[in-house]
Image (cartoon, rainbow, N blue to C red):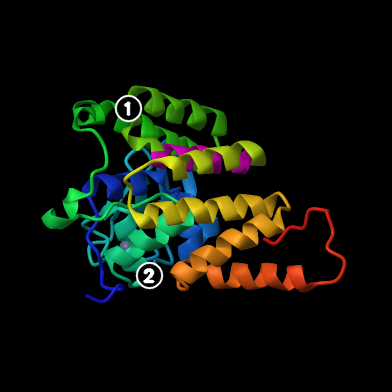
């Protein structure tokens, strides 16, 4: 099976991803009259980017559920759906590509539906499953706060998940790391990503994501040597991973430059 085939993702992770999307940002990414967006309470109205409406704001997004509908009968968006679907029909890509795009953009992990025989990785104790509903809620809330830049609230939610069920520790550590990174608390972020990497029995790609973020926070805090080391390791493992090649080369160029400086350099 080629790697780039569209994969199937769990509904739970797709829902989580959908709720993490900021509808306004999505319309900016699609870039069809994004300046004409109108938000009234929890409803967003915009010119429909699917049938490219020029006269009316026919697109309606419910910001609580992140579901949309276009009121123009002839539009592909008339039947409505979630924002991942809106993005896919507006950008003419399939749903899997849309999900992958948003997962990467927001750094919200997607879970693939596993074939039964792959399930045997001994990962986490089963009893946690019973509480999964409660804990999932806090996780989704945390992600939602994070994407709206409400970092203090996000951190609180993630800490609750950690207390209630340690099953999600890896994901939670990743999200906590991202929160601290956004806050500029680089040392705390490093700590979280490292703790995430210590979680046992998870999949290689999950560790890879954490390593990538760890490399990024090192880079952001001016620790170029540490950052380069990590990016190189990822590159050796998976040269096509995200933008790893670019990041590595950029750092290598700095390494080779004369008089390495201690000051912070912004690369973004
Ligand atoms: Zn439409």
The one of 188 and 18 positioned closer to us in this rendering: 188
The quadrant the N terminus occupies is: bottom left
- Residue at the extreme right of the image, as rendered: 259
Coordinates of residue 68 in the picture (x, y in percent): 31, 51
Coordinates of residue 17 in the picture (x, y in percent): 36, 48
Q: Label 1: which residue?
A: 165
- Residue at the extreme left of the image, as rendered: 116
Coordinates of residue 139 in the picture (x, y in percent): 37, 34
Whether 103 is among the magenta residues is no
Residue drawn at point x = 28 percent, y = 56 percent: 71
Crowding at mark 2 (Cα within 10 Å: few <14, some 14-19, many 20+) = some
146 versus 49 height, above or below: above
Q: Does the residue labelled 2 lie within 8 Å of ligand 1?
A: no
Residue drawn at point x = 73 percent, y = 53 percent: 222
Q: Which of marks 2 and 1 is nearer the N terminus?
A: 2
Residue drawn at point x = 23 percent, y = 26 percent: 131
Q: Is mark 1 within 8 Å of ligand 1?
A: no
Of the two numbered discs 2 and 1 in the rendering, the one whose residue sits closer to the viewer: 1
Q: In the image, 141: left or right of 184?
A: left
- Taking the image as drawn, is residue 69 in sight? yes
88 versus 262 height, above or below: below
Badge number at residue 18: none
Residue drawn at point x = 68 percent, y = 52 percent: 220
- Residue at the extreme bottom of the image, as rendered: 2
Q: For ligand 1, give the image quadrant.
A: bottom left
Q: What stretch is highlighted in magenta?
A: 170-185
| SS label for mark 1 | loop
Coordinates of residue 229 in the picture (x, y in percent): 61, 61
Q: Label 2: which residue?
A: 91
Crowding at mark 1 (Cα within 10 Å: few <14, some 14-19, many 20+) = some
């Amino acid at each position: 099976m080629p790697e780039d085939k569209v994969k199937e993702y769990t509904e739970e992770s797709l829902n989580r991803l959908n709720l993490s999307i900021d509808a306004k940002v999505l319309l900016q990414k699609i870039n069809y009259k994004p300046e004409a967006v109108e938000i009234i309470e929890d409803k967003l109205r915009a010119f429909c980017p699917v049938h490219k409406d020029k006269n009316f704001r026919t697109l309606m997004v419910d910001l609580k559920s992140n579901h949309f509908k276009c009121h123009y009968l002839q539009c592909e968006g008339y039947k409505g759906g979630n924002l991942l679907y809106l993005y896919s029909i507006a950008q003419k890509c399939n749903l899997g590509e849309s999900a992958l795009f948003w997962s990467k953009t927001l750094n919200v992990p997607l879970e693939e539906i596993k074939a039964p025989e792959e399930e045997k990785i001994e990962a986490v104790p089963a009893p946690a499953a019973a509480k999964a509903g409660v804990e999932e809620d806090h996780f989704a809330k945390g992600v939602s706060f994070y994407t709206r830049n409400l970092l203090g609230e996000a951190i609180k939610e993630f800490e609750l998940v950690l207390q209630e069920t340690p099953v999600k520790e890896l994901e939670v550590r990743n999200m906590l790391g991202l929160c601290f990174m956004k806050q500029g608390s680089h040392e705390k972020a490093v700590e979280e990503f490292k703790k995430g990497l210590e979680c046992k029995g998870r999949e290689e790609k999950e560790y890879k994501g954490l390593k990538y973020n760890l490399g990024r926070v090192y880079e952001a805090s001016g620790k170029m040597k540490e950052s380069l080391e990590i990016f190189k390791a990822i590159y050796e493992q998976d040269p096509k991973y995200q933008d790893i090649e670019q990041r590595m080369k950029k750092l290598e160029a700095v390494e080779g430059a004369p008089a390495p400086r201690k000051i912070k350099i912004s690369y973004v």
